[in-house]
Image: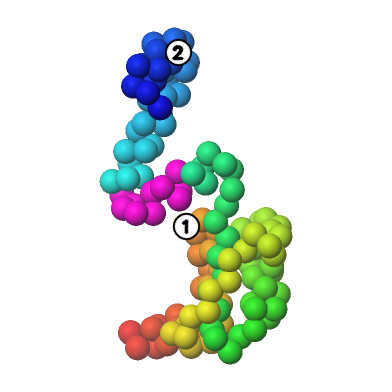
Amino acid sequence: MDNKVLSEKINNLDAKGLQELLREVKLYQELKTKLGDRWEDLFERKHSQEKLLVVEHFTSVSEELAWEQAQVVYQKAFETIVQREKVQFIQKEWLKWGIKVYLDDSMVDLSFEKIAKTIKN
């Protein structure tokens, strides 16, 4: 967008509009500072109201089984119902069995990797 057009739009904002713009600029700055490369995705998701839905599963756990377990986690832990098409499934060999379920930056770990780390400590 042309700087002149952008400047005119800003000049035409009322007090409430300027406060909202300031909030967005502060959020932009905070996300970019704290999250590095991930900030762009998070900033876009905030404005589109979409959630990041990811299920990591061990390679020998089928996507179907991972989905069945993930549905329960989304309902009980996150109190939300999700559509399978919106979930990104990722195979991870190092999980040592089980799944990890993500909703944005929140995660429920149902993998044996977590148990193995606990036993080592």
Q: Nearer the viewer, mark 2 or mark 1?
A: 2
| Visual colour scheme | rainbow
Q: Position of residue 75 (x, y in %)?
A: 68, 62
Q: Quadrant of the C terminus?
A: bottom left
Magenta residues span 34-43
Determine whether, in the image, residue 83 is placed left or right of residue 109.
Answer: right
Binning the other alpha carbons within 10 Å of mark 1 as few (below 14), some (14 to 19) or many (20 upward) gives: few
Q: Secondary structure at mark 2?
A: loop
Q: Position of residue 19 (x, y in %)?
A: 42, 20
Q: Residue at x 54, y 56 (%)?
A: 52
Type of amino acid under label 1:
Asp
Q: Position of residue 9 (x, y in %)?
A: 43, 16
Type of amino acid under label 2:
Leu
Q: Residue at x 58, y 66 (%)?
A: 88
Q: Residue at x 45, y 48 (%)?
A: 42
Rendered image: mark on residue 60: none
Determine whether, in the image, residue 28 is placed left or right of residue 97.
Answer: left
Q: Quadrant of the N terminus?
A: top left
Say if residue 15 shows up in the picture.
Answer: no
Residue 41 counted in the magenta span? yes
> Can you say whether 27 is above or below 118 in the image?
above
Q: Residue at x 64, y 84 (%)?
A: 62
Q: Earlier in the sequence, mark 2 or mark 1?
A: 2
Which residue, given by chain and number where applicable, does mark 1 sit on? 105
Q: Secondary structure at mark 1?
A: loop
Determine whether, in the image, residue 116 is placed left or right of residue 48.
Answer: left
Which residue, given by chain and number where applicable, does mark 2 sit on? 13
Binning the other alpha carbons within 10 Å of mark 2 as few (below 14), some (14 to 19) or many (20 upward) gives: few
The residue nearer to you, when weighing 14 against 75, is 14
